[in-house]
Amino acid sequence: MIKASASAEIRKLVASLTGDAVSRDAALARLAVIGARAVPHLTAAYGGTADRKARAAILRALEPIGDPRALPIARDGLTHGGDLAVAAAAVLGGLLKSSYGATGADALDSLMTAALGERVERRVRLAAAEALRATDVDLRGKLAADAGDDSGNGTGEAAAIWKDALDGRMPDDPAVLRRALDARAGTAPLNDLRNLIDRIRTCETSARPDSDAWRAVRGAIHQALALRGSRVALYDLRETIEAAAAPLPASFVAAVQALGDESCLQAIAAAFANAPSEQERWRHQLGAAFTAIAARERITARHAVMKRISARWPDAANTLSRTRPPRPTASRTSRTYR
């Protein structure tokens, strides 16, 4: 029987699994030490929440304990895809050698089903294959080849995450996709990056608590496209800046400053007009982008777009016009855009 004081400590640790990274890591370490006594609390917490991140954290806490009572929720988690399924596969891998009833056989059956499922996310299939490594059935090579990468060089999971995202199956954690993006942004087909932007924007607008993190990933893609001189997603930059109700990550403004054309000037002016004076940094970034584009495109005060801006946002137009545009260092036709 667990003492009341120990039970209270475990409940507090379980609650900390959804806290900041430091609290979460400390709770995971302590729960691993507590071991089997924490299992009833963890399984109850899993059933008491529908939050995917919380459930994944609970499964990560159960993994080092290796208790057969974790089998039902691990099998459940494996069916839900994403980070939750990856964490569940690790738990099931730790149960493969269990001598308690049919636990080992059931864990093996679930992992085999996931590893060979054609409709299962690539990263989940790889996680299941990795969990099976302690058995006589080794599917890692087959699944790595299916993912289009070599698991031996440590990039198999990143390749699987990337391909799943291109197929529209986004990870739960935007940081996971950001890491895969960092390795591929410079060489990925431009249309793949454009399609990812559209899919990430859907993640942002789905009322998720991590919308800002997804927006930062989208901004990173725009910056990668700017470095490659590509305007394939300029429409998204223009629409995002025009609709901005708060400062965006600097990557958005950096990208539009590098790639923007006259069609972006009204969007920038709208964002500038909507920004309160206390958002000085944001207004400065917008102003710098506006003047850089105007100089590059040779837009003067007599241009039609400037007249429209002055008519609609006279105060913003007056403020923006006070900054002398930088002298262009290259002609409009000297750059190649795709």
Image: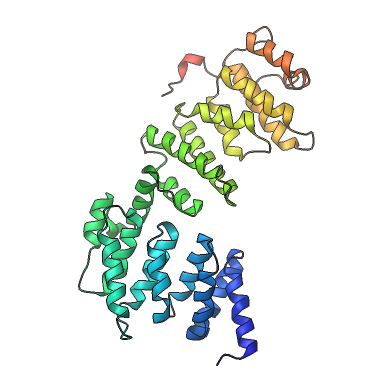
Regarding residue 18, the answer to whether it shows in the image is yes
| Above or below, 121 relative to 206 | below
- Which residue shows up at 45% across the image and 49% down it? 177
Give the x, y percent position of residue 100. 33, 86
> Which quadrant of the rendered structure holds the C terminus?
top left
Q: Is residue 282 above or below residue 150?
A: above
Quarter of the figure with residue 3: bottom right
At horizontal 65% and vertical 88% (from top left) the residue drawn is 5
User: Where is residue 328 shown, x and y percent of the image?
Assistant: 58, 18
Q: Is residue 51 above or below residue 202?
A: below
The colour scheme used here is rainbow
Which quadrant would residue 329 be assigned to in this image?
Answer: top right
Q: Nearer the viewer, residue 266 or 45?
A: 45
Does residue 178 appear left or right of residue 329 in this picture?
left
| Quarter where residue 324 is shown | top right
The residue shown at (42%, 80%) is 69
Seen at 60% across and 52% down, the residue is: 209
Residue 94 in the image: x percent, y percent?
36, 76
For the question of whether residue 155 can be seen, the reply is no
Quadrant in which the N terminus is drawn: bottom right
271 lies left or right of 111:
right
The reply, left or right, for residue 152 in relation to residue 94 is left
Nearest the viewer among 200 and 2 is: 2
- Toward the viewer: 187 or 131? 131
